[in-house]
Amino acid sequence: LHVSGNDYWPVFFGHVGQTTTTQFARALAAMPMQSQPGARYDYGNTGGHYEVLGAVIEQASGQTLEQFLDENLFGPLGMEDSYFYLPDEKLARRPVLYPVSNGEIVAEQAMTQPYPRSTYFFGGGGVESTAADLNRFATMLHGRGALGETRILQAETVQLMMQDHLGSLSTLGDGWSWGFGGAVRYTNASHGTGVPEQYGWSGGGYARLWIDPRRDLTAYVAFPLVAPGNPQLLEEFSQLVYSQAPSE
């Protein structure tokens, strides 16, 4: 979804929290594109492409995105602490997020307020969850779509998700490209065949989830910080995980 930022943001703030996911997607569809589909790669603004996917799910299922994920993902996987809008009784468990400036935590600018309840379900980043729930989600993907006896996705679907779908269009660098729903990294030059080295993504701030099929592991870490700060924190955690992980 290639929409220029100058055009995107007024539409974004005019819909998020005020209309619905589907109405926002329809507004995006009326906007000019920066390029033709398949011509270039652009990560986009606030995951706007996921807003379109959320709208497709709503139209195909006849449910809101919240209802669909509750029924088809959160409930079956036992993700009991994953919500678009936290219930009042769980608000006290929501962590405070702190910005970092010049290497110091800025406590007086802490972010504490959750999204106010509305009819808009932010597919590009609106779900709040816990490390335990995210581990169940990652374990399902690592299990080729199944967690124990519960199957969420077909194995072929997960395999397709973890393939490189950008090829030469990728601008992520360091061997990374993009699959369906996450970044993917291959060690071979063909980028898209065999077993990926890693699959996952980093969230806004200091959170990272990845799956390593070759070493049979999943990992997730989150710090209560928002950028800018020290990006080495995530790299140091990754190094720690692999220092303890079995070799291939």
Image: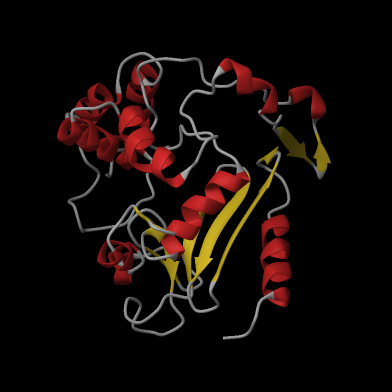
Residue drawn at x 24%, y 30% as measured from the top left: 25
Residue sitting at x 71%, y 62%? 237
| Residue 7 seen in this snapshot | no
244 w.r.t. 85: above or below: below
The N terminus - image quarter: top left
Give coordinates of residue 233: x percent, y percent: 73, 56
Q: Nearer the viewer, residue 171 or 142?
A: 142
Residue 188 rendering spot, x and y as whole percentages: 42, 85
The figure's colour scheme reads secondary structure
> Does residue 166 lie above or below 97 as drawn?
below
| Residue nearest the viewer, comparing 58 with 181 | 58
Locate residue 132 relative to residue 173 in the image: left or right.
right
Residue 105: percent from the left, percent from the top? 81, 37
Task: Please say if 176 is above or below 46.
Answer: below
Which residue appears farthest toward the front when viewing the image?
149
Q: Nearer the viewer, residue 78 or 5?
A: 78
Q: How many marks?
A: 0
- Residue situated in front as seen by the camera: 192 or 134: 134
Residue at 69% from the left image edge and 32% from the top image edge: 97
Q: Residue furthest right?
A: 104
Quarter of the C terminus within the rendering: bottom right
Residue 12, visible in the rendered structure: yes
Residue at 66% across, 66% down: 238
In x, y percent, where is residue 64? 28, 26
Could you say which quadrant of the image residue 47 lies in? top left
**Residue 228: quarter of image:** top right
